[in-house]
Image (cartoon, helix red, strand yellow):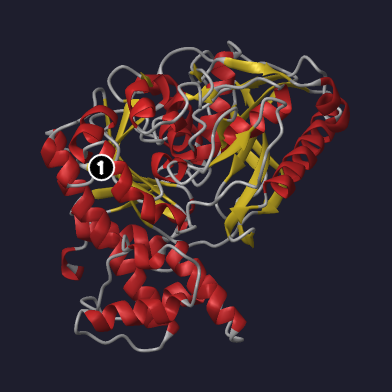
Amino acid sequence: MSETAAQDTAPATAGAVSAAGPSGQVFAGSVFAAVDIGASSGRVILGRVSSPGVELEVVHRFPNGVVELDGGLRWDFDALFAEVLKGLGAAATAAAARNETITSIGIDTWAVDYGLVNAKGELIAQPYSYRDDRSRAAVAPVHEKLDPARLYGTTGLQFLQFNTLYQLATEPDLDGLQALLIPDLIAFLLTGQRRTESTNASTTGLFDAVAGEWATEFLSALDLPKKLFPPLIEPGETVGTLLPEIASRVVLPARTKVVAVGSHDTASAVAAVPAQEGNLAYISSGTWSLVGLELKHPVLTEASRAANFTNERGVDGTIRYLRNMGGLWLLSECQRTWAAEGFTPELTALLTAAAALPSGGPQINPDDPYFIAPDNMPERIRSAVRRTGDLLPDDPAAITRCIMDSLAAGYARTIRDAERLADQAVDVVHVVGGGSQNRLLCQLTADATGKRVVAGPVEATALGNILVQARAAGQLTGGLRDLRRLVVNSHALQTFTPQLARL
């Protein structure tokens, strides 16, 4: 089977990731719990760090998704938090069975969305999802008060209509309320402590990319309360310990810490990118694709703004210079539509059929807002192709190939733009997350970029979460390179080289 064949679709399972850690020490009986939630699913994972390496055990999986509620698309946060508690209970049971102690808990989720909490600590409504269209109408009024160039010059944030500041501009009354980003909201309900973790704060459009603090002048300009967000906290710092009632419910000691990690899931994923040499380019591939470079300083130029790049904070004060692109949401939504119509091919077979099709077929712009909301995705894609003057058959393999070609071409454009704007050349692209299992997408990305692609690990987000916790506990030492060495030594990575005949 060639490297353009279909991905291995076996789900990530409990298992060992073996390697020698930087310290070479064994920390028997101590484990860490990672709460890792994406836009379509979540997991609670136990992580064990020792001299043989890092062992990940998925103890609980649960679905996540938007629901139509109270006139909009929202997250069923009550159900989500109940699953978090169920997962922590499962983690406690699994640890106890091995006579282990859970040292701490770290939480990462998607970005930009928030829940509003009153002075009593009550969530006043289920949080809106970024997929709701309510913020579109707020963009122009916000830009009347804050010039987009001024916004970018301070925050360095890519313009997306669902950025937090546009969502907040739709809120009718925020007096007496605080906005807690989703991972911070979970941490608050676990500990009673209100904090905002910095990597996720940097996605709000209200964070100073240079100072690493809230841009309070923007809050004032938008008539938002100056204390709308809780104080900032950095990855590795302790949020608090479990509330007694929570500890009792999940059967963990009340002294169990909740530690801030890269709470934006991409920040945790990038922390675990297995790179040791040279400049770092990455694609965190999942529901969305986060494509970019790791930098020491933000790029706040007008050219960068025009190219719609974002400067988000990473672990250890790094800058994730990236563009938020469409991702495998396109394919998963197609699969959902096809399943409703009675067509349920294995993903392996679907990708094999797509790989067999010739190159040079029609493409779409995977970043088009047209694809954000859930709907009949196959017809949306075919409609978008028709608008380009081309035709796409109503055939799952052809539609799948269109998605893969479009994503790979988009990745290549984004990496070229990032190299130019940041004046930083790269020769290797690291693909982490679920998309690293998609062999067709990885090979097409190598072909489109002309660069070597290193795929893996799939569980980069959980690994980054666990490694930051372990360092906070003193079980690991050093900087990101030291943490990444564990991943390099511990994970079976796959390399894809450009095939010129396919270009």
Q: Is residue 40 above or below residue 253?
A: below
Give the percent coordinates (x, y) of residue 118: 66, 30
Which x, y percent locates residue 455? 39, 48
- When the figure is inspected, residue 155 is found, relative to residue 59, above or below; the finding is above
Q: Is residue 495 visible?
A: yes
Identify the residue at image location x=48%, y=33%. 268
- Image x and y of residue 406, in percent: 29, 66
Q: How many residues crowd mark 1 within 10 Å: few (<14), some (14–19), many (20+)?
A: few
- Residue 241 location, quadrant: top right
Q: Between residue 32 and residue 317, name the one nearer to us.
A: 317
Q: Is residue 195 above or below residue 288?
A: above
- Quarter placement of the N terminus: bottom left
Q: Quadrant of residue 44?
A: top right
Mark 1 — residue? 144
- Nearest to the observer: residue 90 or residue 222: 222
Question: Could you say whether the residue bearing mark 1 is in a helix, strand or loop?
Answer: helix
Query: Can I make out residue 17 in this image?
Result: no
Image coordinates of residue 104 in percent, x first then y, are 68, 21
Q: Residue at x 37, y 21 (%)?
A: 216
Image quadrant containing the C terminus: bottom left
Q: Residue at x 64, y 33 (%)?
A: 117
- The three-letter amino acid code for the residue at tag 1 is Glu
Residue 121 is left or right of residue 224, and the answer is: right
In the picture, measured across the screen, residue 206 lies left or right of residue 147, that is: right
Q: Residue at x 44, y 72 (%)?
A: 351
Task: Count the marks.
Answer: 1
